[in-house]
């Protein structure tokens, strides 16, 4: 807790007449007022407001402290059960970012490539064409098109074999959450997409929905990234008159036809086109379908049907074309800013050094990193995204990790850039609180609603005197606690942090 010191010194020879003078009395009164104000600020600089959630049955682990120790040896500003093990939800991604930057470095890139053991003769590749997934968390159709274009420039016009999508690094990855397990047959979101080292577009299909010219007609639909009919689109969206409103529901189901995007609802004639994303049934198979369409469009004919493999290409395979990911620091920023679960878990799987990595192994790789930090304490991680409710850590542990990154001058700029400012962050719900909170705090949030509510937030702050601090808060509910909104956490937290920031 920060303490203000106001010291009054009067020379021993000071006469009683001077002590009774108006000037000295005014100074004395002002000094006591300052002392009272400092005492008030110190009393408010804790988690007393946030702590009231404990009265509603929520479990809390919270800690805030300065990253430099003052002359009195004080660093801790406030705490509530700082060593208590609770679910951090997507604050897990901060651990992932730190571990990945530590392992690979900010400028690391993941390479995806087309290789073959066959010979190339007169534009004909005599053998299979293998897409070797490089575990790129941000691989898009733009990257694939560049890869195909480079293959074309290498002189390939025909493949006398099959297109093989190799996900030997990881994939298929076993589902360990209800959302991802259910998504193997049907899904109504994008964040439950299956994981693969050869996935593209975050493992999701994108369908564009646009109004027809005339009300009453079916909407116009098509894949966002391909003119080919790669999947079935069951379009039940009707065009309505202008200003009628637009409401579109979408679900991807997988049946004997393969992946099917079922769309229902309405779109107004004067509405803008909408992109709808839903997780694919199999990420590697989706890549094979997209890549086959691109090869055909580029005039490269493939004789045999595509297939997916979990086998590493032989060492004799020659590289025909390659494409690199964005630098790791940019991937980390996207993972943290948008809390992209697919990207997070794919990046975490890259931390496993053995083939066919699984999520628990990825979590253990991050655990190993965290437990190497002096004073961290225990933690359990089943994923890098935080979607798994079995993840556990403490506020004290999170702060140890944050402080460690702060002191790494070569990594900290890339790390802290991935945290959001409440004043201008991409997540609108964090834009609240006083100007002090909005402009002096950088944070990462975590949210879960099932099987219990989790609201977690952690990051850095700058005090009124320009000192750096770290804070971490985890609020966990149970089956018997009510729904917990973000305002119920961020509003008291912002006031508590205000007190700490202004008092230091």
Image (cartoon, grey):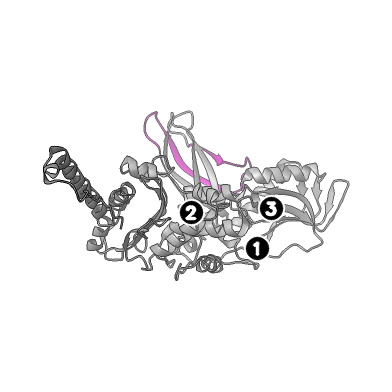
Residue 84 location (% of width, % of height): 36, 68
Residue 191: mark: 2
Residue farthest toward the bottom in the current orientation of the protein:
378
Tell me residue 472's x, y (percent).
38, 58
**Between discs 2 and 1, the one toward the N terminus:** 1
Q: Which residues are magenta?
A: 219-247
Q: Which mark is residue 112?
A: 3
Q: Residue 220: percent from the left, percent from the top?
A: 51, 36
Between 292 and 362, the residue placed more toward the observer is: 362
Q: Which quadrant would the N terminus be assigned to in this image? A: bottom left
Disc on res. 169: 1
Q: Secondary structure at mark 3?
A: strand
| Real-space CA distance between mark 2 and mark 1, rounded to the nearest whole angstrom | 21 Å
Q: Nearer the viewer, residue 212 or 131?
A: 131
Left-right relation of 17 to 202: left
Marks 1/3 in contact by CB < 8 Å: the verdict is no
Magenta stretch holds residue 232: yes
Membership of 382 in magenta stretch: no
């Amino acid at each position: 807790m920060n303490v203000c010191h106001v010291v009054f010194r009067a020379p021993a020879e000071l006469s009683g007449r001077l002590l009774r003078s108006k000037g000295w009395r005014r100074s004395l009164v002002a000094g006591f007022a300052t002392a009272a104000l400092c005492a008030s600020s110190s009393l408010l600089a804790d988690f007393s407001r946030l702590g009231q959630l404990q009265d509603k049955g929520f479990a809390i682990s919270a800690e805030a402290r300065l990253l430099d120790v003052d002359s009195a040896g004080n660093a801790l500003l406030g705490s509530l059960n700082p060593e208590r093990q609770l679910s951090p939800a997507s604050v897990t991604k901060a651990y992932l970012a730190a571990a990945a930057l530590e392992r690979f470095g900010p400028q690391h890139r993941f390479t995806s490539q087309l290789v073959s053991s066959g010979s190339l003769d007169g534009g004909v590749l005599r053998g299979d064409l293998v897409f070797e997934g490089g575990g790129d968390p941000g691989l898009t159709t733009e990257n694939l098109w560049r890869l195909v274009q480079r293959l074309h420039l290498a002189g390939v016009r025909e493949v006398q074999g099959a297109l093989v999508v190799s996900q030997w690094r990881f994939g298929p990855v076993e589902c360990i959450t209800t959302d991802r397990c259910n998504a193997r047959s049907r899904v109504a979101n994008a964040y439950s997409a299956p994981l693969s080292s050869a996935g593209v577009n975050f493992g999701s299909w994108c369908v564009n929905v646009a109004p027809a010219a005339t009300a009453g007609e079916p909407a116009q639909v098509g894949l966002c990234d391909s003119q080919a009919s790669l999947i079935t689109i069951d379009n039940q969206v009707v065009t309505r008159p202008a200003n009628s409103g637009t409401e579109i529901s979408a679900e991807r189901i997988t049946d004997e036809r393969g992946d099917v995007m079922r769309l229902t609802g309405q779109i107004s004639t004067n509405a803008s086109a909408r992109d709808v994303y839903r997780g694919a049934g199999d990420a590697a198979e989706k890549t094979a379908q997209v890549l086959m369409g691109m090869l055909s469009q580029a005039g490269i004919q493939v004789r045999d049907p595509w297939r997916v493999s979990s086998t590493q290409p032989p060492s004799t395979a020659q590289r025909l074309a390659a494409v690199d990911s964005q630098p790791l620091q940019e991937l980390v920023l996207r993972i943290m800013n948008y809390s992209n679960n697919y990207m997070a878990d794919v990046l975490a799987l890259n931390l496993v050094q053995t083939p066919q990595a699984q999520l628990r192994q990825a979590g253990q790789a991050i655990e190993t990193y965290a437990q190497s930090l002096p004073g961290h304490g225990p933690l359990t991680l089943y994923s890098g995204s935080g979607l798994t409710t079995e993840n556990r850590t403490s506020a004290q542990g999170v702060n140890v990790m944050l402080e460690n990154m702060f002191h790494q001058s070569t990594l900290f700029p890339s790390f802290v850039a991935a945290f959001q400012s409440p004043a201008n962050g991409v997540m609108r719900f964090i834009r609240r609180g006083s100007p002090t909170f909005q402009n002096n705090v950088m944070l990462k949030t975590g949210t879960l609603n099932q099987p219990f509510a989790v609201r977690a937030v952690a990051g850095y702050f700058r005090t009124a005197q320009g000192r750096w601090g770290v804070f971490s808060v985890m609020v966990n509910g149970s089956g018997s606690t009510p729904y917990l909104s973000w305002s119920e956490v961020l509003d008291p937290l912002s006031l508590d942090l205000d007190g700490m920031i202004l008092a230091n």
